[in-house]
Amino acid sequence: MEINRDIIQNFISRLCFFVSIFLINILISQLLGASGSGKLYYAINNFSIITLLVSFSLEAGMTYFLARKEIDDSELVFKTE
């Protein structure tokens, strides 16, 4: 069946993903030490939150106006008068 094959492929891909992330975390911890890897992960999380907050305000407004079809795509990007 098609769905069984998809479920098995999904399971295998997720398993490979988690194993690879686990091994990368171990490698980074060994190279940088506990405090170095902690600082790295802290910086990455801070940049992720900043990116999420900055992009949300712009993207949310664009999505809102495009979904309601109140404005054309070209008008949203380029303001022409």
Image (cartoon, rainbow, N blue to C red):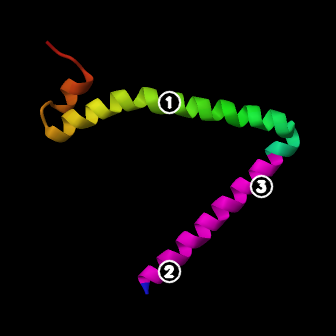
Secondary element at tag 1: helix
| Residue 69: % across, % down | 13, 37
Instruction: Classify mark 1: residues with Cα within 10 Å, few (<14), some (14-19) or many (20+).
Output: few
Q: Which residue is mark 2?
A: 5
Q: Amino acid at mark 1?
A: Thr
Residue sitting nearer the eye, 58 or 53: 53
User: Quick check: 39 above or below 12?
Assistant: above
Whole-Å distance between the Cαs marked 3 and 1? 26 Å
Residue 75 as seen in the image, left or right of residue 50: left
Residue 63 as seen in the image, left or right of residue 33: left
Quadrant for the N terminus, please.
bottom left
Quadrant for the C terminus, please.
top left
Q: Are marks 1 and 2 in contact (CB under 8 Å)?
A: no
Whole-Å distance between the Cαs marked 2 and 3? 27 Å
Q: Amino acid at mark 3?
A: Leu
Instruction: Classify mark 2: residues with Cα within 10 Å, few (<14), some (14-19) or many (20+).
Output: few
Q: Which residue is mark 3?
A: 23
| Residue 39: % across, % down | 75, 31
Secondary element at tag 3: helix
Q: Which residue is mark 1?
A: 51
Which residues make up the magenta segment? 2-27
Determine the image quadrant of residue 41: top right
| Residue 12: % across, % down | 61, 71
